[in-house]
């Protein structure tokens, strides 16, 4: 059993955990929930003796972790799946841990089979995927066959088959009378795996109860009611009857009604008294996720906001015409070339034809753009896609030697 009493941890001016007390009992999977930054990882580190509490204490089996004889044989933990030497193979990593704790080597091969890594046991762990790393971390936690196990996000990176395997593994360990403490952000998985919940927010205890009690205490059930779709007047009669009896009625997207504040038999009686025929009347209970969100909404430190995208999608003015030439291309008639040129009427002047064709009527070149005239035969031609030079030769005149040399170098 894990027991925390008045557990407090401060880092300078920041209090990560404050006066936290709880018990994790054997024979059940206990989920450890809380928003990001709520102190879950800090609490688990204090349980394992990796961080010393500022105040209070936490024990495992009645003893602080550091005083447990041969602690790896009594407590197994997965806190960081990446805490593995990448140059070691999976088997050598586990073998080194086993040798430090006096665990026989045959146990290494046993746990590799349990987690499904026996075929890659001699591969270096730096080549493992995230899911494979998680399996190796779980194998390390199981190595000493401990009675107490702590897992921090054990299904992170696993595929659906792996998630189902971890779920069954946790339940199986708890059914053997072990203490299983699991931290996770996946509410749907916790609803299927955990028997008990400990919820913290901003370092303080918010809830310590069974999953069923948590959902019922922090959410409201409702009745789902549906009337014939071809009789809207019956729907209106039912809404009036339910509202008049103190019920709260909300329409749902599929046309059904969500009724809260009235028990199911009362909803049925009111429909009968109003002579309304029902197509559906079913009870519904909120999910663990809905109950969790309802409870922790005041303890969330990091809230997202809508992205205004201010100015990022501003329209770029484009001259009228059928086309627009991206950088490095050319525009057809009536288009516009953004990078140092402009679209000629009817096409463009390819390299070696001595310049640009006449621009389309009404389309002047960009400001500062030069329009070179024909070049003498034998003179290297400039790149027709390159930006024009600041200084242009007079119209119809051949460029000087310096300009031709510079154009030739830029074209190269």
Image (spheres, rainbow, N blue to C red):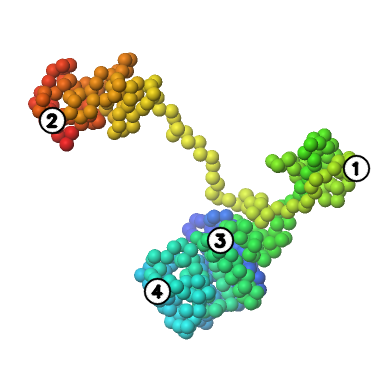
Residue drawn 55% across and 64% down?
Answer: 161
Query: Mark 3: few, some, or many residues within 10 Å (few <14, many ≥20)?
Result: few
CB contact under 8 Å: marks 1 and 2: no
Query: Which label is found at residue 122?
Result: 4
Residue 322 position (above or below residue 299): above
- Gap between marks 3 and 1 measured at Cα: 49 Å
Which numbered disc covers residue 380? 2
Instruction: Answer with left or right where residue 54 lies relative to residue 199.
Output: left
Mark 4 vs mark 3, CA separation in Å: 25 Å
Marker disc for residue 273? 1
- Viewer-nearest residue: 58 or 116: 116
Q: Where does label 3 land, which residue? A: 160
Image coords of residue 24 (percent x, y):
63, 70
Counting residues from the start of the chain, the first of labels 4 and 1 encountered is 4
Residues at badges 4 and 1 in contact (C-beta under 8 Å)?
Answer: no
Closer to the eye: label 1 or 2: 2
Q: CA distance from mark 2 to mark 3?
A: 65 Å
Instruction: Check disc 3 and report its element: helix, strand or loop.
Output: helix
Of labels 1 and 2, earlier in sequence is: 1
The Cα atoms of the two marked residues, 4 and 1, are separated by 73 Å
Q: Does any portion of residue 182 appear in the rendered image?
A: no
C-alpha span from label 1 to label 2: 97 Å
Question: Is residue 397 positioned above or below 216 on the image?
Answer: above
Looking at the image, tell me whether mark 4 or mark 3 is earlier in sequence order. Answer: 4
Q: Is residue 172 left or right of residue 373?
A: right
Q: Nearer the viewer, residue 265 or 185?
A: 265
């Amino acid at each position: 059993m894990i027991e925390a009493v008045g557990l407090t941890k401060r880092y300078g001016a920041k209090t990560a955990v404050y006066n936290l007390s709880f018990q994790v009992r054997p024979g059940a999977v206990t989920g450890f929930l809380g928003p990001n930054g709520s102190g879950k990882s800090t609490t688990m580190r204090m349980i394992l003796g990796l961080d010393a509490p500022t105040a209070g204490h936490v024990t495992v089996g009645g003893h602080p972790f550091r005083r447990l004889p041969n602690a790896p044989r009594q407590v197994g933990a997965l806190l960081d799946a990446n805490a593995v030497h990448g140059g070691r193979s999976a088997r050598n990593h586990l073998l080194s841990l086993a040798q430090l704790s006096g665990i026989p080597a045959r146990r290494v091969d046993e746990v590799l089979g349990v987690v499904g890594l026996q075929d890659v046991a001699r591969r270096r762990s730096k080549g493992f995927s995230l899911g494979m790393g998680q399996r190796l971390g779980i194998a390390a936690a199981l190595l000493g066959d401990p009675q107490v196990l702590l897992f921090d996000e054990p299904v992170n990176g696993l595929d659906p088959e792996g998630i189902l395997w971890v779920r069954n593994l946790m339940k199986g360990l708890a059914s053997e009378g072990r203490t299983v403490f699991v931290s996770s952000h996946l509410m749907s998985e916790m609803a299927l795996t955990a028997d008990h919940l400990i919820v913290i927010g901003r370092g303080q205890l918010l809830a310590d109860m069974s999953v069923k009690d948590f959902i019922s205490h922090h959410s409201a059930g409702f009745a789902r009611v549906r009337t014939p779709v071809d009789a809207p007047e019956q729907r209106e009669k039912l809404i009036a009857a339910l509202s008049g009896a103190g019920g709260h009625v909300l329409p749902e997207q599929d046309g059904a009604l969500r009724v809260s504040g009235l028990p199911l038999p009362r909803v049925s009686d009111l429909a009968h008294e109003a002579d309304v025929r029902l197509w559906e009347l079913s009870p519904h209970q909120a999910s663990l996720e809905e109950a969790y969100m309802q409870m922790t909404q005041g303890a969330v430190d990091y809230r997202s906001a809508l992205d205004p995208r201010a100015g990022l999608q501003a329209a770029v003015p484009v001259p009228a015409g059928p086309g627009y030439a991206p950088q490095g291309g050319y525009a057809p008639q009536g288009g516009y070339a953004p990078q140092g040129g402009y679209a000629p009427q009817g096409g463009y002047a390819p390299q070696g034809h001595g310049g640009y064709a006449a621009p389309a009527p009404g389309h002047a070149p960009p400001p500062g753009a030069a329009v070179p005239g024909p070049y003498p035969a034998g003179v290297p031609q400039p790149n027709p896609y390159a930006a024009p030079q600041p200084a242009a030769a007079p119209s119809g005149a051949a460029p000087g030697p310096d300009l031709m040399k510079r154009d030739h170098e830029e074209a190269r």
